[in-house]
Image: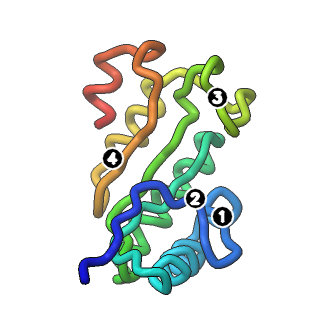
């Protein structure tokens, strides 16, 4: 039977990517989901600081390079969201997509980088360059 593909995995095995943006954290998350039939996943960071986003991007990139089974990329869920639709996200972390974040998100990496963004709040040129 084919395995499951999960593009939004905030954590697993007692680890949240926001709390442990490391190769070891990514490995624990992937192993926890593999037990339930997930064969491909994207560890997901919810709205956080630029420094934490950079750590998560690097950790997933390194995990893919290290051959952590099932990790196919990273999902950055915010902080480029609309406060009117914030859900569980801390609106205090929200920011507009700017040149600094475009450079960070557009850096070549292993795997897929998926970003959840409120397009109504973003400059279309920033979106094009970031992704």
- What residue is disc 3 on? 86
Looking at the image, which residue is at 33% across and 47% down? 107
Query: x and y percent of residue 36 in the render?
Result: 48, 81
Query: x and y percent of residue 58 in the render?
Result: 46, 61
- What residue is disc 2 on? 10
Q: Is residue 34 above or below residue 98?
A: below
- What residue is disc 1 on? 16
| Front one among 24 and 102 | 24
Please name which of the two marks, 2 or 4, marks the residue nearer to the observer: 2
Looking at the image, which residue is at 27% across and 29% down? 129
Q: Residues within 10 Å of mark 1 (few under 14, many from 20)?
A: many
Are the residues at dot 1 and dot 2 in contact (C-beta closer than 8 Å)? yes
- What residue is disc 4 on? 107
Q: Is residue 46 above or below residue 126?
A: below
Mark with earlier residue (1, 4): 1
Q: Residues within 10 Å of mark 4 (few under 14, many from 20)?
A: few
């Amino acid at each position: 039977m084919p395995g499951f593909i999960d593009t939004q995995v905030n954590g697993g095995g007692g680890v949240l990517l926001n709390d442990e943006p490391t190769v070891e954290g990514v490995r624990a998350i992937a192993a926890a989901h593999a037990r339930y039939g997930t064969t491909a996943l994207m560890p997901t960071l919810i709205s956080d600081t630029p420094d934490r986003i950079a750590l998560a991007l690097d950790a997933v990139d390194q995990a893919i390079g290290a051959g952590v089974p099932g990790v196919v990329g990273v999902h950055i869920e915010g902080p480029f969201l609309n406060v009117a639709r914030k859900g569980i996200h801390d609106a205090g972390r929200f920011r507009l997509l700017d040149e600094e974040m475009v450079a960070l998100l557009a850096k070549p990496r292993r795997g897929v980088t998926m970003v959840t963004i409120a397009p109504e709040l973003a400059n279309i040129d920033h979106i094009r360059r970031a992704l």
